[in-house]
């Protein structure tokens, strides 16, 4: 039975026994480890379920939002986000190999490393075009590029087969200490993004759709809009979208 009695306050003259506290930490670590093993088994079941893609950025974003919303205590929420990002990277890699092509400054590569995990292969490319071609040819799972892209990059998403989509925006946690690398980036893949519950989309020729921001000729609009969505203006081209980032820190 767990001991749910409150720990006495040191103001009452109580002093903790360091050996007891370390033993308690070991016990908690074992329980966390057992749960991680159980979680990995569930992931194996998900992999056998026949779902089309191992990497689901919308689902991952919704998991992190839920955990940050319920988080309490002095452990920084950004630490929680970092821990889960590594775990999500590891369990995604259980389902299929993941390689990330990166183009742009070193800070963009740092965003890729932070988001996709320390052990995930990062393949630096000399140009955005080379990174996109690597993804199209199936030699990389995703590409991470500087944001906002130039007009040629936006056009390249639909210029060849298979076509490409924006599926995520980095960094996902934005309350960043001064010493932490920071660069705006987007993630590109051959599969369309999945919904997270709080999303934005990029559209060429948005017509009368309410626009949140313009990036050259590309409009950013609220919600995750599918290519076959009803009511799209004639000539509109959906270029993908992303889960809106979170602060990643407790109030």
Image: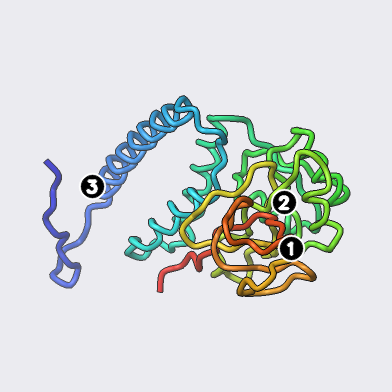
Pinpoint residue 244: horizontal percent, then vertical percent: 55, 63
10 Å neighbourhood of mark 2: few (<14), some, or many (≥20)?
many
User: Of 166 and 6, which appears nearest the observer?
Assistant: 166
Instruction: Kindly report the distance in space between the C-alpha atoms of the residues bearing marks 1 and 2.
Output: 21 Å
Contact? badges 1 and 2 (CB < 8 Å): no
Nearer to us: label 1 or label 2: 1
User: Of 213 and 46, which appears nearest the observer?
Assistant: 213
Residue on which disc 3 sits: 20
Question: Disc count in the image?
Answer: 3
User: Please, what secondary structure does the residue beneath circle 1 have?
Assistant: strand
Residue on which disc 1 sits: 204
Instruction: Kindly report the distance in space between the C-alpha atoms of the residues bearing marks 1 and 3.
Output: 62 Å
User: Please, what secondary structure does the residue beneath circle 3 have?
Assistant: helix
Residue 160 lies, with reference to residue 15, above or below; the image says above
Pinpoint residue 75: horizontal percent, then vertical percent: 39, 61
Sequence-wise, the earlier of marks 3 and 2 is 3
10 Å neighbourhood of mark 1: few (<14), some, or many (≥20)?
some
Nearer to us: label 1 or label 3: 1
Which picture quadrant has residue 30?
top left
Here the colouring is rainbow
Residue on which disc 2 sits: 144
10 Å neighbourhood of mark 3: few (<14), some, or many (≥20)?
few
Residue drawn at (48%, 29%) of the image = 47
Nearer to us: label 3 or label 2: 2
Residue drawn at (61%, 46%) of the image = 116
Sequence-wise, the earlier of marks 1 and 3 is 3
Instruction: Kindly report the distance in space between the C-alpha atoms of the residues bearing marks 3 and 2.
Output: 47 Å
Pinpoint residue 144: horizontal percent, then vertical percent: 72, 51
């Amino acid at each position: 039975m767990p001991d749910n009695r409150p720990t006495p306050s040191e103001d009452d003259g109580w002093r903790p026994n360091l050996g007891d506290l370390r033993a308690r930490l070991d016990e908690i670590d074992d329980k966390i480890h057992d749960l991680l093993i159980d979680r990995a088994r569930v992931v194996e079941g998900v992999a056998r379920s026949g779902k089309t893609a191992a990497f689901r950025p919308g689902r991952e974003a919704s998991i992190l939002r839920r955990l940050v919303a319920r988080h309490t205590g002095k452990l920084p929420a950004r630490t929680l986000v970092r821990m889960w990002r590594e775990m999500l990277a590891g369990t995604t890699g259980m389902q299929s190999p993941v390689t990330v092509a990166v183009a742009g400054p070193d800070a963009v590569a740092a965003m890729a490393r932070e988001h996709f995990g320390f052990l995930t292969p990062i393949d630096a490319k000399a140009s955005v075009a080379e990174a996109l071609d690597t993804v199209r040819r199936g030699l990389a799972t995703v590409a991470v590029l500087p944001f906002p892209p130039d007009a040629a990059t936006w056009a390249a998403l639909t210029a060849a087969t298979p076509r490409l989509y924006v599926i995520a925006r980095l960094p996902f946690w934005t309350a960043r200490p001064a010493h932490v690398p920071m660069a705006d980036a987007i993630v590109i893949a051959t599969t369309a993004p999945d919904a997270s519950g709080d999303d934005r989309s990029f559209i060429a020729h948005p017509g009368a759709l309410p626009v949140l921001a313009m990036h050259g000729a590309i409009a950013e609009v609220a919600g995750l809009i599918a290519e076959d969505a009803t009511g799209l203006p004639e000539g509109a081209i959906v270029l993908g979208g992303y889960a809106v980032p979170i602060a990643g820190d407790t109030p």
